[in-house]
Image (spheres, helix red, strand yellow):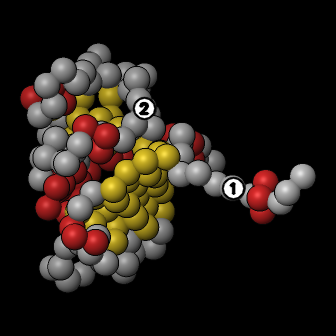
């Protein structure tokens, strides 16, 4: 049985929902490169987001040529980001430490968005990606921690 805490869940129109591990991202992502080439000061090995996306779409049988309007990502620590597609130029998945072993800092999978509006779009401990067809308001990225409040917490004591 696959350990889903080590995989990123993926939702995309026209494809069955599923998940991929860092190794599976590596297999579809093309050439592996040092992430420091795109994100100064970052360490580890990465694969190109767009190369992975094209290969993943083909493997899933997603047809059509339209690209999503945005990417919604969630991390294991409740951090979320909504990223306009245009800001994903140069994006990459951090998939391993420099020695090729599992990504210890921010892993097992990390999304780097060097062309994004903020360094906060470098999402560590990636848990889910939702490819969204709806454009974001004003085509701007949003990000922050998701605050879940249970109804019982709202009641007066």
Residue 25, percent from left and from top: 32, 47
Camera-side residue: 91 or 137?
137
Q: Residue at x 24, y 81 (%)?
A: 63
Residue receiving disc 1: 149
Residue 157, percent from left and from top: 90, 52
Determine whether 15 is above or below 40 in the image: below
Q: Please identify the residue farthest to the front as the structure is shown.
A: 156
Taking the image as shown, residue 29 lies to the left or right of residue 5, namely left
Taking the image as shown, residue 40 lies to the left or right of residue 76, namely left
Q: Which mark is residue 53?
A: none
Determine whether 60 is above or below 82 in the image: below
- Total tally of numbered discs in the picture: 2
Residue 81, percent from left and from top: 37, 53
Label 2 with label 1: CB-CB less than 8 Å: no
Q: Residue at x 18, y 35 (%)?
A: 32
Q: Secondary structure at mark 1?
A: loop
Answer yes or no: is residue 21 visible: no
The answer for how far apart the CA atoms under marks 2 and 1 are is 27 Å
Camera-side residue: 14 or 145?
145
Q: Secondary structure at mark 2?
A: loop
Residue receiving disc 2: 107
Mark 1 neighbour class, 10 Å CA radius: few under 14, some 14 to 19, many 20 or more: few
| Res. 61 image quadrant | bottom left
Taking the image as shown, residue 16 lies to the left or right of residue 71, namely right
Residue 74, percent from left and from top: 46, 52
Q: Earlier in the sequence, mark 2 or mark 1?
A: 2
Answer yes or no: is residue 117 visible: yes
């Amino acid at each position: 049985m696959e350990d889903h805490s080590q995989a990123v869940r993926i939702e995309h129109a026209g494809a069955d929902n599923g998940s991929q591990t860092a190794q599976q991202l590596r297999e579809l992502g093309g050439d592996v490169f040092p992430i420091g080439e795109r994100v100064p000061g970052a360490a580890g090995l990465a694969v190109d987001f767009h190369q992975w996306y094209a290969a993943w779409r083909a493997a899933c049988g997603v047809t059509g040529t339209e690209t999503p309007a945005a990417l919604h990502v969630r991390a294991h620590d409740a951090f979320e980001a909504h990223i306009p597609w245009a800001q994903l130029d140069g994006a990459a998945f951090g998939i391993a430490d420099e020695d090729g072993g599992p990504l210890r800092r921010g892993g097992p999978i990390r999304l780097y968005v060097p062309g994004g509006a903020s360094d906060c779009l470098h999402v560590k401990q990636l848990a889910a990606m939702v490819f969204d067809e709806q454009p974001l308001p004003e085509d701007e990225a949003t990000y922050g921690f998701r605050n879940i409040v249970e109804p019982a917490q709202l009641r007066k004591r």
